[in-house]
Amino acid sequence: MKTLLKTIYISILLTIFFSCNNEKVSFNDDDTTIIANLPQVNINTYGNEIVDEPKIKAEMTVIIDDEIDFTGNIGIEIRGSSSQMFPKKQFGVETRDANEEGISFSILGFPEEEDWILSAPYSDKSLMRNILIYDLSRDMNRYASRAKFVEVSINGEYNGLYILMEKLKRDSNRIDINKLKVDENIGEDLTGGYILKIDKASGFNETLYNDTNAITSHYAPNNASNNQKIYFNYDTPDFEEITPEQKAYITNFMYAFEDALAGSNFTDTTEGYRKYIDTQSFIDFFLLNELSNNVDGYRLSTWLTKDKNEKLKMGPIWDFNLAFGNANYCGGAETNVWAYKFNERCSQDFWQIPFWWDRLLSDPVFVSELKTRWVELRSGILSNQGIIDKIENYKNLLITSKAADNNFERWPVLDQYIWPNNYIGNTYSAEINYLKSWIQERTLWLDVEIMNL
């Protein structure tokens, strides 16, 4: 009986989605296919409200062109920090088995996992800032969350355009580092893998850091005017699972790195900062944050990994909704400022940028490597044409599938100020044109300024 009811339920979903939400594949007069529907995600919460912890029981069905890609039990909760002020919520999703235990599935062709995110672009009216930067990062051979546009309905009501994304976590197909076990507390086993974050503190108080949940840097951020500190949050193992020996190892490693970077012999190739970090990962992280003038860059949503017997790496990148000229504070809208100099513009902000970047850019060898990488990327992956082509492809997909129209009918934010917009376009096309123009001005400035470092 349960199987029969589920079959009827899915049949009803298919009928609703493809008769109401979107048109099917459309054709020109010459029968040339234009575009199919975006994947449709329907969530049934059985009438229960989705809350910010704990995850509630629900069922999710993902449909692509009349075919069911996934259907099954999930746990779902509201996620995010500042984004929770918006009426369009983003969600954390865990795929579950019949016993409500997490179980891995492949969704939309992504590698199997159980933890997923339905990101909800709202103040980002281009709808594409995150997916753009993540695609660019992967093109540079730097892992970033795989992501695809989808349309979401909750309990039969359309809720807008979303981006289905991989949650960042240790996994052979995501952040591919060694799994550090609880009994690995000596020798080389102790050297990795670790994931740290420079970010808001977890829990209800985003400014509450202590020795239990984070490492406190010994070095004050440059230009800070309110005695701010830098913290490295434990992510993997998290503060509840990390052993005293593991905590001591990664803490001392971070102290040794910062001491070497701050020291008078910091450029020494064997005993300076290079002993501790993968410089190329730092360079690519820098270039992606500067390309987009990410107002949160370096100080929030900043991930670091330390694999077994390896050096510290920057990344993966995360959360660029306020980048590419979409923030009207602390220089976030400008095309002619350095993102890494945020502290100079907003010295009172609680979350500041570590001293690392000023110091690294005082090393001629690091700067030379950065310039070489920028020139290489600008000739291909980060060329203006390459970036604009990506934007045009996203735009065409969202317009021809009617997903953009559907989203802005559900959430009529065009021509409205939504925090922290710098630009307010009257139309979706205006928002896209602003994004393209902003990027072209930004790269023009960076081409000169990077060579002048």
Image: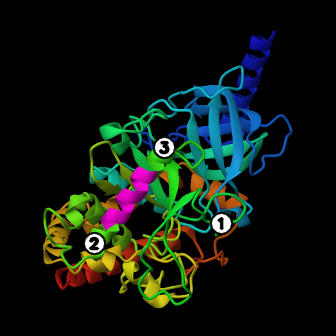
- Give the Cα separation between the discs numbered 1 and 3: 21 Å
The residue at 48%/41% (across/down) is 27
Figure check: 204 above or below 182? below
Which residue carries the number 3 mark? 169
Choose top left, top right, bottom left or bottom right for residue 21. Answer: top right
Pointer 2 with pointer 3, Cβ within 8 A: no
Residue closest to the eye, 415 or 219: 219
Residue 200: percent from the left, percent from the top?
A: 58, 65
Give yes or no for residue 319 being in the magenta stretch: no
Q: Between tags 1 and 2, which lies in front?
A: 2
Q: How many marks?
A: 3
* Residue farthest toward the right in the current orientation of the protein: 47
Residue drawn at x 23%, y 62% is 279
The label on residue 206 is 1
Camera-side residue: 12 or 268?
A: 268
Q: Secondary structure at mark 3?
A: loop
Q: Is residue 122 visible in this depiction of the protein?
A: yes
Could you tell me which secondary element the residue under label 1 belongs to? loop
Question: Who comes first in sequence, dot 2 or dot 3?
Answer: 3
In the rendered structure, the answer to whether residue 222 lies left or right of residue 364 reads right
- Residue 31, position as x, y percentages in the image: 43, 37
For the residues labelled 2 and 3, the Cα–Cα distance comes to 28 Å
Pointer 1 or 3: first along the chain:
3
Identity of the amino acid at label 1? Glu
The residue singled out by tag 2 in the image is 261
User: Badge 3, how many Cα within 10 Å: few under 14, some, many 20+?
Assistant: some
Determine the main secondary structure of the stretch shown in magenta.
Answer: helix
Is residue 177 visible to us here?
Answer: no
Disc 1, disc 3: CB below 8 Å? no
Secondary structure category for the residue under label 2: helix
Magenta-highlighted residues? 248-257
